[in-house]
């Protein structure tokens, strides 16, 4: 659901998304790869992550604040 919100700017912001479970959301389902393809060239392209480390999830979110949808350039 957050992917759709980020893609269409539903709430006027794009937010970081990180998935906990590299196997589950990587090779097993292809979910993150699919989202990366959809996000290519979009503002939230640099706000997708995948890890097995809960501490990395916290760090990822802390380092990537939501950004107003439609702000100039691709989010970084």
Image (tube, rainbow, N blue to C red):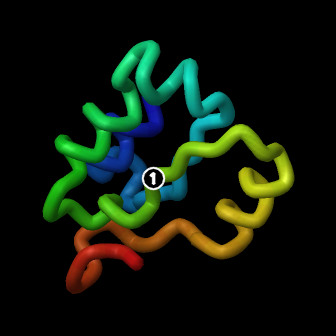
Q: Which residue is located at x 27 percent, y 66 percent?
A: 43
Please give the residue where the numbered disc 1 appears in the rendered image: 48
User: Mark 1: few, some, or many residues within 10 Å (few <14, many ≥20)?
Assistant: some
Residue 32, above or below 64: above
Q: Position of residue 7 (x, y in %)?
A: 26, 46
Front one among 55 and 7: 55
Quadrant position of residue 12: bottom left
Secondary structure beneath disc 1? strand
Which quarter of the image is occupied by the C terminus? bottom left
Residue 8, above or below 40: above
Residue 45, above or below 7: below
Q: Position of residue 2 (x, y in %)?
A: 46, 37
Q: Is residue 56 left or right of residue 14?
A: right
Q: Residue furthest bottom?
A: 72
Q: Which residue is located at x 65 percent, y 29 percent?
A: 21
Front one among 61 and 22: 22
Quadrant position of residue 37: top left
Front one among 20 and 74: 20
Q: Residue furthest top?
A: 28
Q: Position of residue 61 (x, y in %)?
A: 67, 61
Q: Is residue 2 left or right of residue 40?
A: right
Q: Is residue 31 left or right of residue 39?
A: right
Q: Position of residue 16 (x, y in %)?
A: 53, 56
Q: Is residue 67 left or right of residue 58?
A: left
Which quarter of the image is occupied by the N terminus? top left
């Amino acid at each position: 659901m957050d992917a759709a919100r980020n893609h269409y700017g539903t709430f006027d912001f794009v937010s970081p998304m990180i998935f906990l479970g590299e196997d589950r959301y990587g090779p097993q389902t292809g979910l993150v790869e699919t989202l990366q393809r959809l996000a290519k060239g979009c503002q939230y392209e640099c706000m997708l992550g995948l890890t097995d480390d809960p501490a990395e999830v916290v760090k990822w979110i802390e380092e990537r604040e939501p950004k107003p949808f439609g702000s100039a350039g691709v989010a970084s």
